[in-house]
Image (cartoon, grey):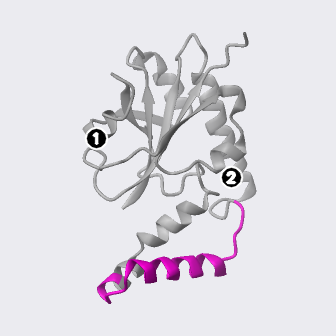
Amino acid sequence: MCFYITATLPKISKLEEFRNLFNTYNMAFTPITNEIVQSQLRMGDLYFRATKAYCDCDTILGSLNKLQDYQTLLNSKKVKTLRKKKWTDEEIDKWIKEKLKKKEIKVGRKFTPMERDEEIKRWMEFLHSLLDPKIVSRIGLLKHWYNKGLHNEEIKIKRTERVEVNDISPELLLNLEEDVLYEFFPSYGF
């Protein structure tokens, strides 16, 4: 189906106060009810579809992570055809790895360098703007390849990575892993 970026915010967050900020950065923060995901979050955390895009298959987030290319090929029409031809999982895995080896890896291949820089800058500015201690105490981002819908996808969060806002870098955002919840926090400067 598609990649989607979802987000978490603390229960006490007042979304209406953030609407202008969300609109400035083309974010939607549409509420999602997914009991499987919510059971893995902090008690009472709010869960959202982050962006306004139709889907996030072309997101810059995690675009340099090789697992994303693997996942895209694994969910391709070609692999579905190979499964119909009775290929085993091992044969499909080998085929995908060969395909990835042959493919010339280009940094940000879906974007021009300028587009990539602008998109990374947009995400970084959004996170920095939102992560003011007076606005919100943390935001979580989760990227997942959906085979079902947003409300019934069975996602297993691999782990949670905690990142201070001052540690957010283009490299971090470009290499986000799928199914890892990245929780971003303000820097308090103590």
SS for callout 2: helix
Indicate the amino acid at tag 1.
Answer: Ile
Q: Is residue 86 above or below residue 129?
A: below
Magenta stretch holds residue 96: yes
Q: Where does residue 7 sit, x and y in percent of width and height?
A: 45, 35
Q: Residues within 10 Å of mark 2 (few under 14, many from 20)?
A: few
Question: To which residue does mark 1 refer?
Answer: 36
**Residue 115: mark in rendering:** 2
Left or right: 115, with 147 as reference point: right
Q: Residue furthest front?
A: 90
Residue drawn at (44%, 83%), measured in percent from left and top? 91
For the residue pair 64 and 125, the one nearer the viewer reads as 64
Q: Is residue 19 above or below residue 85?
A: above
Q: Where does residue 113 sit, x and y in percent of width and height?
A: 74, 56
For the residue pair 36 and 121, the one nearer the viewer reads as 36
Residue range (magenta): 83-107
SS for callout 1: helix
